[in-house]
Amino acid sequence: MRPSPAFEKRFGEIVDRRRGAEFQVLRSENLLNRLSGSAMPFGWTVNPFRGCEVGCRYCYARPTHEYLGHGDPGEFEEHIYVKQAEGRKLLPSLIRARASGQEIAIGTATDPYQPAEGRFAVTRGVLETMERVPGLRIGLTTKCTGVLRDRELLARLARVSDLWVNLSLISLDTALLRQVEPRAPRPDLRLEALRVLGAAGVRTRLFLMPVLPMLTDGESGLRELLSAARAAGAREAISQALFLRTEMTWRVFLDFVGREFPWALPRYRALYPRPGNGPAGYRQEIERRVTRLAAEVGFPARTREERVRAEAPARPRQLALDW
């Protein structure tokens, strides 16, 4: 399929091939994008890459690769675009973001510390510029322990801005996560990242999203995860039940469940007969369960929806397509 006309002139050279993936430059006007449309708990985004090597089976951003001419869902993790932008535009944009009082969310669509960051350091460049603009509100979300390469930079940034690092971890079951998130670090390594960042003075959250029916929604597993994250120094847990946003996301994930967990497929088809959320009753059950278990281990917890209501900008916003 052909890429969207908006992207055709932005493609640069192939800059690397490794780990079964190809890496290509994507020229961008600015690495910081402002939102317009539906409510989010932030008003600005930074996504240093398009495509993601981590390969989460439930990833909602996979269909966005179609704008770049990739119709095969697997190409989202096999053809990674590395953004390049003129640095002179980032600094004034960050100053505007600070004036807005809204959070800048790093890694809303793809992981900013996926393995490619170790080669290209796009995320680090953004953080170094952020350090020049004290007083920002920043939320950085990752599954990857590569974030520890920048712990000293993040610690300095935490001293001058309102910074949270959101560590995504949905289970302590290593074998399960190797199937669901095939190239993400092991759970114990992610917990160690929480400990190291906390010791450096960086506030951290556990992002327990998504909770997967029949795979990660059991009480014992959730309690162990919440307890471990709390012990590792996370200040808060944010949770959400599985949301299969688009037709592609829904089809890819249910195909995966059918291959790897065929015994669970009838339940998934009942809960998710079409793209979107599961039934309200199931979502509320998960919300109550996580809230109760978190309270039992002394861990503050909110749902994603509660966070949106508490922190969303006053005017509704939506992720722009040019991220």
Image: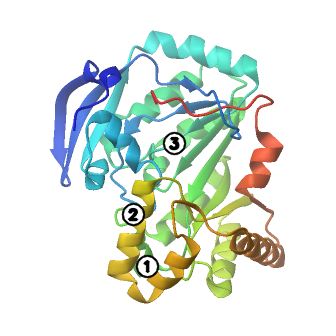
Crowding near the residue tagged with mark 2, few <14, some 14–19, many ≥20 C-alpha atoms within 10 Å: some
In the image, is 222 to the left or to the right of 320?
right
Say whether disc 1 or disc 2 marks the residue closer to the N-terminus.
1
Of 260 and 234, the residue lying toward us = 260
Residue 96 location (% of width, % of height): 66, 15
Residue ID for mark 3: 107
Q: Position of residue 149 (x, y in %)?
A: 44, 45
Q: Residue at x 36, y 48 (%)?
A: 52
Residue 270 occupies quadrant = bottom right
Q: Amino acid at mark 3?
A: Gly
What element does badge 2 sit on?
helix
User: Residue 55, how many percent across, how many down?
Assistant: 36, 58
Number of the label disc, if any, that sits on residue 176: 1
Q: What residue is shown at x 30% (from left), y 22% (from top)?
A: 5
Amino acid type shown at disc 2: Arg
Q: Are marks 2 and 3 in contact (CB under 8 Å)?
A: no
Mark closer to the observer (2, 3): 2
Which quadrant of the figure has residue 157?
A: top right
Left or right, 13 with respect to 58, comes to: left
Circle 2 sits on which residue?
A: 251
Q: Earlier in the sequence, mark 1 or mark 3?
A: 3
Q: Amino acid at mark 1?
A: Leu
On residue 250, the disc is none
Tag 3 secondary structure:
loop
Q: Nearer the viewer, mark 1 or mark 2?
A: 2
- Secondary structure under the numbered disc 1 in the rendered image: helix
